[in-house]
Amino acid sequence: MVRLLGYFFGMACVLFLVAAAGIAIYLANVAKDLPDYAVLNSYAPPVTTRVHAGNGALMAEYAKEKRLFLPIQAIPDRVKAAFLSAEDKNFYNHPGVDLTGLGRAILVNLQNFGSGRRPVGASTITQQVAKNFLLSSDQTIDRKIKEAILSFRIEQAYSKDKILELYLNEIFFGLNSYGIAGAALTYFNKSVTELTVAEAAYLASLPKGPANYHPFRHPEAALERRNWVIDRMVENGYVSQSDGDEAKKQPLGVTARTTGPSLFASDYFAEAVRRQLIDQYGEKVLYEGGLSVRTSLDPQLQLAARKALQDGLVTYDERRGFHGPIKQIDASGDWGKALADVPALSDVPEWRLAVVLAVSDSNVDIGLQPAKDGSGKVATERQRGTIDAKNMQWAFRSADSTRKSTKSPVGAVAPGDVVYVEKLGDDASTSYRLRQPPKVQGGLVAMDPKTGRVLAMVGGFSYSQSEFNRATQAMRQPGSSFKPFVYAAAMDNGYTPASVIMDAPIEIVSGGQVWKPENYGGEVGGPSTLRSGIEHSRNLMTVRLANDLGMNIVAEYAERFGIYDHMLPVLSMSLGAGDTTVLRMVSAYSVIANGGKQIKPTLIDRIQDRYGKTIFKHEERLCEGCNAGDWQNQEEPNVVDNRETVLDPMTAYQITSMMQGVIQRGTAAGKVDLGGRDVAGKTGTTNDEKDAWFVGFTPDLVAGLYMGFDTPAPLGRGGTGGVLSAPIFNEFMQAAVKDMPESKFVIPSGMNLIPIDRKTGMAAVDGDPNTIIEAFKPGTGPADSFSVIGMDSTMAPEEILKTSPQANQAVQTGTPGLF
């Protein structure tokens, strides 16, 4: 018996050694292809890029995986406790594999064998890190063995806190959110530090199966799993029984932010920033690099710009009548679901979609679009309202030639028509005004002229209606708003504001073609000063001036100011016949406003990488001494402005003064009033009134806009920059400068201010009612004799005497000059 037992013992030892050798060989074979866990030390996951407004408000996020990396020190203990309780309660005690949990899982799987149930896992947090970072998700023995080996090695190389940090920042939570910080924002619109016990427990329940515990599709399962996690937190001593019971009474409270943050009215600006970031760094860096972008956007100015442009577009559109309903639906039964499915303008919350229920001569009964919850379920409540006839009178006129105009709501709308409405009065009011999205569009930009920082940008009536940015992408003719640069080139080359140019018909023959430009309205004024030419936007004078100056010079100035990259030096371009953008025009006017310094327009102030290192900064001016450690009676530091001067500061002031005259006496007279503040600007109207422009500025702010149809078409009689665009500029600027300190345009040192006759350009006679103070550069002044630039055979001298009282007066006083 002893020998038999010895024999069996020997056989067992041999078998054990063989098995051990086999296992060793197997493990060695599995381990030789293991990935290098040292890569965890340089973990750099795809992280969300966040874009902020100038005041720090979060404007937009861009990511393929919504993730914000948080160091373990920034994650509250209650959040860590929730995940430890849900996933690995012995995390801080086991060496990487929890043998107790593994044994328990084996027993459960043996019991479930043959039942078709998915095998229960016993993966620790360390094992999940090994799988998520280094291995596949294959359900195989080989992968589990590799996972265990890597877990032991990871535990030897990294601290528990580091492993937990990797886990909490990597795991997927559903709704395209990754990492605990991203999940807190996505599910609760909160930072991690603001999460309650119940919220932390729900997030901790998601890694096991986000789809199984979806807050809207499977709310009961989600609530049950969350409460299970809370019970485990109580059992493990992380939460008291009373706090746990209170947490379990709370609803899920998920307010899913599936579309990301959005600063109201900033969509066009944010999209322009996104495009710039892609151009500068590429899509991979934008969507995975975790950039922190501080933009130049001023949210208050952006709101003012949006309102001003929308008001102008709507006013123009309503004057031309009603386009008809958005859609027709059946309003005889429960109209709520059909109306809820009609897409609304999400970025125009002041307006709501409504369906016409009944129409009479005095009013229209409407049903308002019901809301949808996160799962797409339509609310059961049906709200109603009324549109009085007086609040839709503009719609009695039809903008559609196939429809007839009417004198009451009957005929304008019909039951089943889906229309936009805007509430009148307080929240309790049921009175509404009829609205319609305008077909006319436009773009507006506001800029700091000293730095080039774009403070506001509106690319159209609604980003939801059209994502095309008319402030940066629309190439439009600036028309007469280009003229100041022709006159600036002239005054940089020997002309003065008092120089006299012929305002009379002219013919330009080129290549057998005859071009006959005309003034708006067709009138001519005879000999007139450059100031008069700017103030009254005289085309004929501008063409003569450009011809006398030379279009090569005009083209060089236009390119220097950044209006065009390459301007064709032909005379029609002097009237703004080339295509450019609102942003370029506002940038060019900023050079005039800041006294001639070149600027680089920018939407971005600073960009930091995921580690906080600044990789881009717009401000290039130098400031020696600005970062002094302490004050030792040194002089206050000065910012050294090393930017190139592209326009004589004296010329800049002369053009500014002339454009002040545009507002005081010219084409924008009575349209712009900033309460006595210094303001200058220029109107612009293109051929056939297809585009209406206004660009203007105070000493501290430049703004410009155009209005026109996306497919250029006439705006109609009176569709000029002075009539349509100047009021929009005025509305915006009144709101923008309201809280700004008042400042004046600075007269450069050395300029001579001389009273002249604003009609003849010569020195004024005492008591002359036509006297105006004009700015002259040193060595220049009013002409001693009456001379006219650009007089040719088009108008004989005797004709000039008939049409020009000032010329006739010059002859009578013995100072005929040219005559």
Image: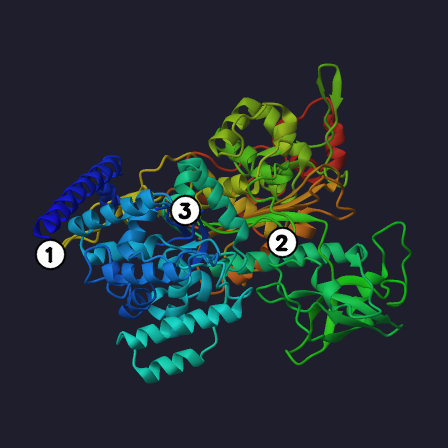
The type of residue carrying mark 1 is: Gln
Q: Is residue 423 above or below residue 214?
A: below
The type of residue carrying mark 2 is: Ser
Q: Secondary structure at mark 2?
A: loop
Q: Is residue 620 above or below residue 371?
A: above
Which residue is identified by label 1? 632
Residue 604 numbered mark, or none: 3
199 lies left or right of 490: left
Locate residue 268, reporting x and y percent: 54, 49
Residue 462 numbered mark, or none: 2
- Residue 640 seen by the camera: no
The type of residue carrying mark 3 is: Ile
Task: Work out how far the residue at label 2 is from the one at label 3, CA to CA, in angstroms.
Answer: 23 Å
Task: Work out how far the residue at label 2 is from the one at label 1, CA to CA, in angstroms.
Answer: 54 Å
Residue in the foreground of this view, choosing between 332 and 659? 332
Q: Is residue 726 above or below residue 589?
A: below
Say few, some or many: other residues with alpha carbon within 10 Å of mark 2 (under 14 / 14 to 19 / 20 or more). Answer: many
